[in-house]
Image (cartoon, coloured by chain):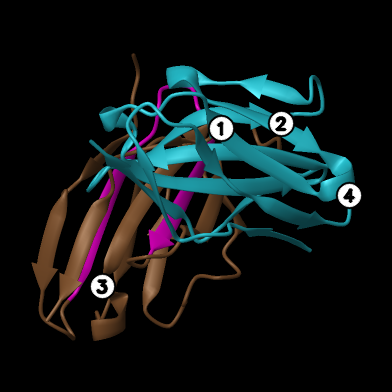
Chain colours: A cyan, B brown
Amino acid sequence: AQSVTQLGSHVSVSEGALVLLRCNYSSSVPPYLFWYVQYPNQGLQLLLKYTSAATLVKGINGFEAEFKKSETSFHLTKPSAHMSDAAEYFCAVSNFGNEKLTFGTGTRLTIIP
Amino acid sequence: EAEVAQSPRYKITEKSQAVAFWCDPISGHATLYWYRQILGQGPELLVQFQDESVVDDSQLPKDRFSAERLKGVDSTLKIQPAELGDSAMYLCASSRRREPKETQYFGPGTRLLVL
């Protein structure tokens, strides 16, 4: 079984401040982890993914995430928030032998001018 | 850049009516997924195809939902009859291969409202 928990359904940060969105996973086998972004009334776009190579993964739009096995976490960060980062962010997990993606409930990011 | 196409983008229907959604995956992508996303939640897999074959439909309410991918390319998801609880965003995604590491590329979705 696999699952994802995203702490904080809503996060607000000031423009230029650090963005930190939390994701913890549960998986009985080594996981593959994904972060997707969704803008209003649109589909999901991949930001980055962890596939057991480097634990620090860099993605698009200045985002990065670090896989920490000891903490079962895959938190998403960006050093300086931009107004265009306002969106819904989803963490998802698959694992060896099961390509089915299991998504978290999402975190809505609001950027304060 | 190739994209997953979906139509219609929006659909309003009355309960007990039939609705159908269409998806055209990225060319060459063998694996196709249909997800349902209820407002405020993450997407949940309804059905997965590998070419024209169903791989996983364990979460598909088969008494009212059906899906097909006859030629292994585009796909149709149907609901008959629609119920109020079916109001949601229906997302189609595709990937090159059926592997856990593969990126799934999502279409823009069809937002369904059942009155």
Earlier-in-chain disc, 2 versus 4? 4
On the image, numbered disc 1 is attached to which residue?
A: A77
On the image, numbered disc 4 is attached to which residue?
A: A29
Earlier-in-chain disc, 2 versus 1? 2
- Neighbour class for label 4 at 10 Å: few (<14), some, many (≥20)? few
Majority secondary structure of magenta residues: strand
**Contact? badges 2 and 1 (CB < 8 Å):** yes
The kind of secondary structure element at disc 4 is loop
Query: Residue A41: image x %, image y %?
Result: 22, 48
Residue A77 is left or right of residue A32, and the answer is left
- Neighbour class for label 1 at 10 Å: few (<14), some, many (≥20)? some
- In this view, the residue in front, A15 or A34, is A15
Query: Residue A108: image x %, image y %?
Result: 38, 52
As for residue A19 lying within the magenta part, the answer is no
Query: Residue B63: image x %, image y %?
Result: 43, 83
Query: Residue B78: image x %, image y %?
Result: 30, 65
Disc 2 versus disc 4: nearer the observer = 2
On the image, numbered disc 3 is attached to which residue?
A: B87
Query: Residue visible at 30% across and 59% down?
Result: B89
- In this view, the residue in front, A5 or B23, is A5
The answer, for residue B102, to whether it is visible in the render is no
On the image, numbered disc 2 is attached to which residue?
A: A66
The kind of secondary structure element at disc 2 is strand
